[in-house]
Image (cartoon, rainbow, N blue to C red):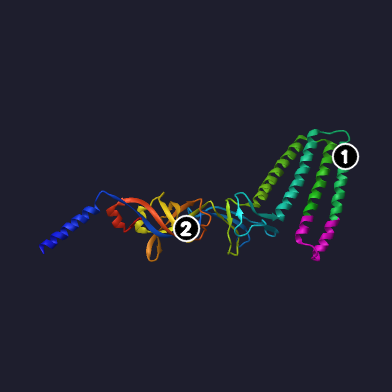
Amino acid sequence: MTRQISVIAVVAVVLLGIIFLPVDVPYNIAVQGRVVPAKEWSLSRSRNDAIETTVRDNERGGVTQYTVNRFAGGDAARLTIEPGLQSGSTVHEGDTVASIYSNEIARQYSELSGRLNMATASLDLYATGEKEAVVEEERVKVLQAEELSRQHQLELNRLRRLRSESLISEQELELAESEQRVLEAGVEVARARYESVSSGAKPEQIELTRTEVRSLQEEIDEITERLRLSTITSPLSGRVARSFGADTLVSIYDTTAYVVMMIVPLHRRAVVGIGDTVLVSVAGLADDVSAVVSELGDEVHIAHGQEVLLVHARISNPPRFLFPGSSARCRIQVGRVPIWEFIRQGLSVSA
């Protein structure tokens, strides 16, 4: 009996000696994961018919860019998706994906451009002063502007009758009314120019016209920016994804990098670090794909009855036949640890 106790004691001492040897052993953590694009961009329609674009960063988690295009009530806006955009199509950063046409914006741009042209012409005339035969020339321009306005008014009256009988669209009538307002403004400008050259422009009148030109130009610049934003381009290079949502019009995912989203037990979080190598095994691929831990979650979740954290690993230049959405078996190579830590963590020694 005493001998058995001695043997057990010797074995225990030997085991303790092995456990606390100053020797590190390699090991890894085996977990499940899912492959997703590093970034995704989507073009969608909201409940109030606004057009929204969203860039989602799956590596860091969260939305990094969001834009919305809203339209005035009654504005007959039209969204056109670029022809040829199909599921699997390749898209490069900066490529046009869709265009928005707004009748209201087009009307404002046309009206402001006409007013700016007339104001600029008036300013040029005021600045150069009176010239011989200028008065007669401006008088003729008044007559011409009045005749154009009169003729268009007759056409506008005809269109109003057609609209009352629902023979033309409301937008067509609105455009005609807008053009009539521009013509009437042209008549007023022509009369003002005629009066000015007849009596001579005053300095304050010249300054007032300069102010008007600047104001109109600022308004046109603002509308030009809105027109630029009406051309929707892709902020990333990738492929068009198949869309199953009723409100999602176009979805593009990044193909230059993927992310493996892994579930790591909370008690093993301490041994996982940024920069650790992850070997990713996916069905259909003969070789493992290498990834690098890039993000460590700090929010606890419950999965399969245990507390876990999300860990993200980046796959740069993914192989051709690795597809987003694939399930993966992952081995996080966390380096070398003392034998006692290896046993405590319950990790298996890497092959």
Amino acid type of the residue tagged 2 in the rendering: Ala
**Front-most of 236 and 119?**
236
Percent across and percent down for residue 25 are 31, 52
Percent across and percent down for residue 73 are 68, 59
Residue segment shown in magenta: 154-176
Q: Please say whether residue 169 is visible from this viewpoint.
A: yes
Q: Which residue is drawn at 88% across and 39% down?
A: 137
Q: Residue 314 carries which label?
A: none
Q: Residue 286 carries which label?
A: 2
Q: To which residue does mark 1 refer?
A: 137
In the rendered structure, the answer to whether residue 76 lies left or right of residue 254 reads: right
In the rendered structure, the answer to whether residue 8 lies left or right of residue 182 reads: left
Provide the secondary structure element on which disc 1 rests: helix
Percent across and percent down for residue 245 are 58, 64
* Quadrant in which the C terminus appears: bottom left
Q: Which residue is drawn at 87% across and 53% down?
A: 151
State the CA–CA distance, disc 1 to disc 2: 85 Å
Q: Does the magenta stretch include residue 157?
A: yes
* Quadrant in which the N terminus appears: bottom left
**Front-most of 93 and 170?**
93
Q: Is residue 118 magenta?
A: no
The chief SS type of the magenta part is: helix
* Marked residue nearer the N-terminal end (1 or 2): 1
Q: Please say whether residue 296 is visible from this viewpoint.
A: no
**Front-most of 253 and 299?**
253
In the rendered structure, the answer to whether residue 9 lies left or right of residue 351 reads: left
